[in-house]
Amino acid sequence: MTQVKGKKVYLGTNTKMYKGVADTVSYLEELCRLTGDLSREALELFVIPAFTALESARRCAPRELVRLGGQNMGWAGEGPYTGEVSPKMLLEVGADIAELGHSERRHVLGETDEMVNRKVLCAAEYGLTALLCIGETAEEKAREFAKAPSGITGLETAFSVCNTYL
């Protein structure tokens, strides 16, 4: 792998709702077996499993081989937010990354740029890497990106006050 001085290639996947605990563990064991001999100097692998699989995933996948993350995260460290996953919870089960602003959350569940902004700031506050999704809608794919994907238009809003943390 050719490396630009000081740069890394980040390569990862989100298992969405396709893999439970056993399938996630099997997947990660095989990933570690197949990539364990690759230098991590120029490569950073990450997997974003279902929250219910994160703790088991961390036990089978050493941090130096694969970084793990949550598929979503609330915008508060804790509080009365039924069903949300806090940054403290992600850290407790071994996550390093919080995937935020995914297209399904935006287009199906109505998550706004302002909500994503709050989550990005919260992730930074707790030392998690914010993996900010800037994907396109099906309509944008169909018209072959005649305009910027909707996620990109929200990028400025999502990072509007992040300079405090970066």
Image (cartoon, rainbow, N blue to C red):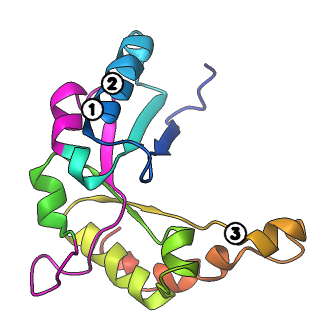
In the rendered image of this protein, does residue 148 appear above or below residue 6?
below
At 59% from the left and 82% from the top, the residue drawn is 154
Compared across the picture, whether 47 is left or right of 77 comes to right
Q: Residue type at mark 1: give it.
A: Ala
Figure quadrant of the N terminus? top right
**Which range of residues does the magenta coloring cover?**
55-84
Of the two numbered discs 3 and 2 on the same chain, state the one appearing first in sequence.
2
Q: Which residue is mark 1?
A: 22
Alpha-carbon neighbours of circle 1 within 10 Å: few (<14), some, or many (≥20)?
few
Q: Which residue is mark 3?
A: 136
Mark 3 to mark 2 CA distance (whole Å): 31 Å
Q: Position of residue 16 (x, y in %)?
A: 44, 53
Give residue 26's mark. Answer: 2
Q: Residue type at mark 2: give it.
A: Ser
Which of label 3 and label 2 is nearer to you?
2
Mark 1 to mark 3 CA distance (whole Å): 31 Å
Compared across the picture, whether 135 is left or right of 79 comes to right
Asked whether disc 1 touches disc 2, contact meaning CB atoms under 8 Å apart, the reply is yes
Most foreground residue, 34 or 124 = 34
Secondary structure beneath dot 1 equals helix
Compared across the picture, whether 143 is left or right of 38 comes to right
Residue 92 is one of the magenta-drawn residues: no
Secondary structure beneath dot 2 equals helix
